[in-house]
Amino acid sequence: MTDLTDRVSLVTGSTKGIGKAIAMALIERGSRVVVHGRDQAATRAVCDRVGAYAAVDGDLATVEGTARILDQLAAIDEVEVLVNNAGIFSVEDFFAIDDDEWLRYHQTNVLSAVRLCRALLPGMLERNWGRVINLASEAGIKPLPQMIHYSVSKTSLIGLSRGLAELTKGTCVSVNSILPGPTWTEGVEKYFDGLAAEEGRPVEEVLKSYFREHEPNSLIQRFVTVDEVADAAVFVAGHGAVHGRALRGEGGIIRAI
């Protein structure tokens, strides 16, 4: 594997969940990790707690917020590993989602990555070394009817990743996407707590039936852990020949060879 010691990594949306797990895994590999969140105090607290290199804050869903983050990065160091993890999800009725909500998902889940890649990828190409890792989802290949807006945004990320990979041909810069399946995060835990309350059932009972009823194709029949997603990110960051891939870590939900 490629030595990541002292490589500067930016992990967006890294104050909790998958992003935080990836940040911690990269720190364990010796990377100088810059954590990111929207709230300055919360992001700084996570930075101190996990022993990160630095912290940046700002809303990647906006041009102004992204500019703020890039200004902070300019005063820290050149980013060599970019992990675009920041994103949102929700279960919604397709027919009730208006244009503003579609645009909010596109801004948050897609254009956030576009803006950072546009700003940071040229430097990687100039230095002839870099990694871009975009957190997509199995929903990008197997769209979920209860999350069509989210699924479409993740399909876009997969396409963005492959297209950007083509721009790096012949260099030591790689671009990949990772496709986790249903992953147990704080947000997912909150969702299932709410669902259990709505159905008047213990959350343990709801979880027990979830994969049997909603994800029967899953081969692992459980949620992916954030540490498993982090392991996949570290693997991609450490192998330059893994390039232009949509790496599946969804527990076999996508029934395909």
Image (tube, rainbow, N blue to C red):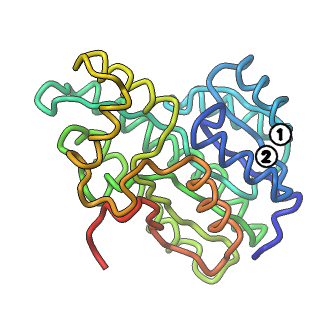
Residue found 30% across the figure and 16% down from its top = 197
Asked if residue 159 shows in the view, the reply is no
Quadrant position of residue 45: top right
CB under 8 Å between callouts 1 and 2?
yes
Residue found 59% across the figure and 62% down from its top = 232
**Depicted 131 relative to depicted 90: above or below:** below
Residue found 80% across the figure and 40% down from its top = 74
- Judging depth in this view, the residue of 216 and 245 nearest the camera is 216
| Label 1 Cα neighbours within 10 Å, binned few <14 / some 14-19 / many ≥20 | many
Residue 223: % across, % down: 43, 47
* Left or right of residue 83, residue 207 in this image: left
Lower sequence index among marks 1 and 2: 2
**Depicted 194 relative to depicted 175: above or below:** above
- Judging depth in this view, the residue of 67 and 38 nearest the camera is 38
Asked if residue 43 shows in the view, the reply is yes
How far apart, in angstroms, are the residues tagged by discs 1 and 2?
5 Å
Residue 115: % across, % down: 54, 44
SS at mark 2 in the image: strand
| Label 2 Cα neighbours within 10 Å, binned few <14 / some 14-19 / many ≥20 | many
Residue with the mark numbered 2: 33
Quadrant position of residue 81: bottom right
* Left or right of residue 72, residue 189 in this image: left
Quadrant position of residue 93: top left
Amino acid type at circle 2 is: Val
- Judging depth in this view, the residue of 231 and 210 nearest the camera is 210
**Depicted 78 relative to depicted 187: above or below:** below
* Left or right of residue 17, residue 131 in this image: right
SS at mark 1 in the image: loop
Residue with the mark numbered 1: 52
- Judging depth in this view, the residue of 168 and 3 nearest the camera is 3
Amino acid type at circle 1 is: Ala
